[in-house]
Image (cartoon, coloured by chain):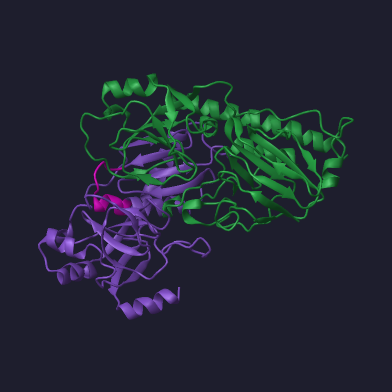
Amino acid sequence: MAQPRPLGVIPLGDSAAYVEFSEKLDLEVNSVVQRLGLAILKRKVPWVRDVVPALGGLALHFDPDHPEFPAKPLEGALALVLESLKAALAAKDNPGSEVVLPVCYEPEFALDLAEVAKKAGLPPQEVTHLHLSGEYRVLMMGFAPGHAYMGGLDEKLAVPRRASPRAIVPAGSVAIANEQTVVYPYAISGGWNVIGRTPMVLFDARRQRPSLLWPGDRVRFRAISRAQFVEMAAGQ
Amino acid sequence: MSIRVLRPGLLTTVQDHGRHGYQRVGLCPGGAMDPVALSLANALVGNPPEEAALEITVIGPELVFEQDTLVAVCGAEFQGGFPHNRPVLAKAGTRFNVGRAARGARAYIAVAGGFAVDPVLGSRSTFLPGQFGGFEGRALKHGDLLPLRDEKAVERFSVLKKTRDGTVKWSAPPLTLPDREPILVHVIEGQHFASFDSNSQRAFFDTVWRIAPDSNRMGFRLSGPPLGRPQADEILSGPTCLGSVQVPPSGVPIALMADHQTTGGYPRIAEIASADVARLAQLAPGGKVHFAKCSLEIATELRRDARERLQSAIRAISWEYGVKTK
């Protein structure tokens, strides 16, 4: 693969910028973006408050009142990215953690399993099996705190989102759409197809590490029974 | 040391300048919708600008001070006959009955010493969607007892020079309040501006937009002509920012405010100059705004100017506190 280079720096107002690497989702580019995000964070640049790796590039959120904030922020952002890119490309594979998420795929939690099976032309057990055997990577976090967009879903499961979103998707719902899977951290409205539920709390602001998942993390799912779900949920 | 809530008002929350460093896990900084007014309210009671205060919205609360409290209200003008933009020593048992906003939408009630609520992820701001931060992660309700930090309010107030009726004769300038509507808000073109049809591009700048009723701390929906793109292709979801103006398929633009989502899949037609976000936050539903295009350089200049004006106002207030402490 050719060495990824930024396509451009797009201002997000006067206090942030988006450094774009790709207009389409490309898993290899995203992997570089993840490593780049960590390389920039490591430099602890005092005028950068937040580094947000996204599907096709990353956002830098500035502290524009910091005395070292560059007079030309877009040039400053690009320079920072180019300087960090070398270190990012030298970094091996994915620097994120490995996370195994327990999921109960029992019918009472798999609200859309029948629908997904029908659309995919597969028996329901096969849908669950394919989801379980996948290896996923956090491509971007957003929509809600702790909500990760994970790539790596088997293309046989790539069904579109529900025609009409649910007003409330229960917290912990594990859902799929297109070629991604997500876990809803809160009870919130959403349109992805729910095929199971985890008893884990995805985001808790009172924890030292508030989010269970972080950008670049590698994620696998492990099937648990309803009894295990209840037990684990009680222990949270 | 506490304040009792008799009536919570429409939406009263504890807010400071927000929590930074968690946007990569999907948590926006949040914090005060009008951080300028918050900073001024804090300065007025001798607090550092980043202290937490009560953000009150459109309909104010009724509060009782259980002990002598040095307090200041800054931001929108609310009915109720108490002084805005200056420090006031509220005696124990004083009822603070705040009415409706007469001009602007949000004000900050700061108390000397601040509120004794624990910071969560480095901030005392209430994040309503996640139900954490501030006072029990929620808006205030009837019967709440808000703990205050022990602060010698009477002593702090005593250093200020007062007129014969015991009040100070100066006040802080209302830096973010609209003096007329529509207010003018500067924007730079968003990443997807060019993908909108030319009528929509023109309409965005030629329309007096109204803040729709279903607007909140997450975003302001703008009522006006629907905006469209000739090729309604899906764009790759990407990061958003405070002040991003995104246009979902309905064509109704949404300006992202303090509690916004950190990523979005809708095209962004504009990005609001950061200096003007606090001014926009002072519009209530029904309020009117129009947009003017500016360059990134102008937006940066506006930010510097707004910051200098805030700093000089804070300096002037600190000076009032400093003179007699010598």
Q: Is residue A64 magenta?
A: no
Q: Chain A rendered in what hue? A: purple
Can residue B48 be seen by looking at this rendering?
Answer: no
* Residue occupying image coordinates x 27% and y 60%: A175
* Residue occupying image coordinates x 53% and y 41%: A63
* Vertical side of B21 occupied by B182: above or below: above
Q: Quadrant of the N terminus of chain B?
A: bottom right
* Vertical side of B180 occupied by B320: above or below: below
Q: Is residue B268 left or right of residue A121?
A: right
* Vertical side of A194 occupied by B160: above or below: above
In this view, the residue in front, B105 or A5, is B105
In this view, the residue in front, B102 or B126, is B102
Can residue B277 be seen by looking at this rendering?
Answer: yes
Q: Position of residue A185 (x, y in %)?
A: 39, 60
Q: Position of residue B54 (x, y in %)?
A: 63, 45
Query: Which chain is the one coloured green?
Result: B
In this view, the residue in front, A226 or A21, is A226
* Residue occupying image coordinates x 39% and y 21%: B207
Farthest left residue in view: A121
Number of numbered callouts drawn: 0
Q: Is residue B111 left or right of residue A123?
A: right
Q: Position of residue B237 (x, y in %)?
A: 31, 45
Q: Is residue A30 magenta?
A: yes
Q: Position of residue B90 (x, y in %)?
A: 79, 43
Q: Quadrant of the C terminus of chain B?
A: top right
Among the 4 quarters of the image, the one containing residue A157: bottom left
Q: Is residue B107 left or right of residue A172?
A: right
- The magenta stretch spans which residues? A21-32
